[in-house]
Image (cartoon, rainbow, N blue to C red):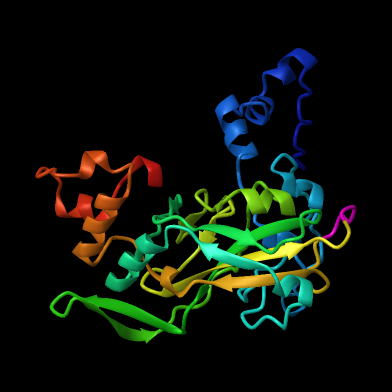
Amino acid sequence: MEYTSSPKPQLSSRANAFSIAALMSSGKSSKDKEAEENTIKPLEQFVEKSSCNQQALADLSSLDGHGDFSGSAPAVCTEPLIPTNPGIPSEEMAKISCSLETKELWDKFHELGTEMIITKSGRRMFPTIRVSFSGVDQDSKYIVLMDIVPVDNKRYRYAYHRSSWLVAGKADPPLPARLYVHPDSPFTGEQLMKQMVSFEKVKLTNNELDQHGHIILNSMHKYQPRVHIIKKKDHTASLLNLKSEEFRTFVFVETVFTAVTAYQNQLITKLKIDSNPFAKGFRDSSRLTDMERSSFLFPYSS
């Protein structure tokens, strides 16, 4: 005798409204929706990079801080989306200069060997990359970006008895390359001449599956932040194609850092506590454990 499965019962419209699937689909809280809206979409999904087989898909309207990116995610690219050896800039772009703000503070960290904490959820940088521009065309529009590239192909370890970083071997496999577009982009030239551009919202992570647009780094590797400025040739264009856009790259050697999951150099920990205005509770506290000092768990940085 053959057995046949009984037909799936049909739910009434009222019952269907309270089904598990319906409740799950509508179960997003306002907090979850807000977090989703505030998620920084990684720009590498929308920048052409032929060696990574990516499609040129940048909707410029989404760069005003209010739009939303659309399009399918590309294949993972591990090469810098902006060349590490950019070509000679045009005469107009060559006039643009970029200055690092709070350079004195960066110099203090650089002298000790700057370290930046990376976490699964993402950690803000301190010091923060802040720059100012000059020589821009007052009537043109510009997009300001930042990325972080490896300094070399080495992995490091900290030798406590020597208070110095030593090469520990070959670098780990490269991670997905990402660009961080400043949320206030595009700027007018007039705006850039009047204000400082701060990358205080940039977050660093070691989560290779990060979906929040944070910059993904390997722990115990050295990195160089880079600031890029792109001039939009056509203000009505909807595509951001780095092969045809004019841009300049600025590198500040004093901002090189080693990515860590816990601070290695105690002098770096002390300098961060002394310099960070959000670290008041960590100053002059004898109750802090070594791990708390090492991790530098500031609310500002989480």
The correct choice, above or below, for 44 with respect to 154 in the image is: above
**Quarter location, residue 87:** bottom right
Q: Quadrant of the N terminus?
A: top right
* Closer to us: 266 or 198: 198
Percent x, y of residue 160: 16, 74
What residue do we see at 69% from left, 48% from top? Answer: 191
Q: Quadrant of the C terminus?
A: top left
Residue 147 counted in the magenta span = no
* Closer to us: 165 or 249: 249
Residue 33 seen in the current view: yes
* Closer to us: 209 or 153: 153
> Which residues lie in the magenta part?
235-239
Percent x, y of residue 137: 77, 60
Instruction: Locate residue 112 relative to residue 227 in the image: left or right.
Output: left
* Closer to us: 63 or 186: 186
Instruction: Locate residue 188 relative to residue 266 in the image: left or right.
Output: right
Instruction: Locate residue 286 relative to residue 197 in the image: left or right.
Output: left
Percent x, y of residue 81: 67, 71
Percent x, y of residue 229: 68, 64
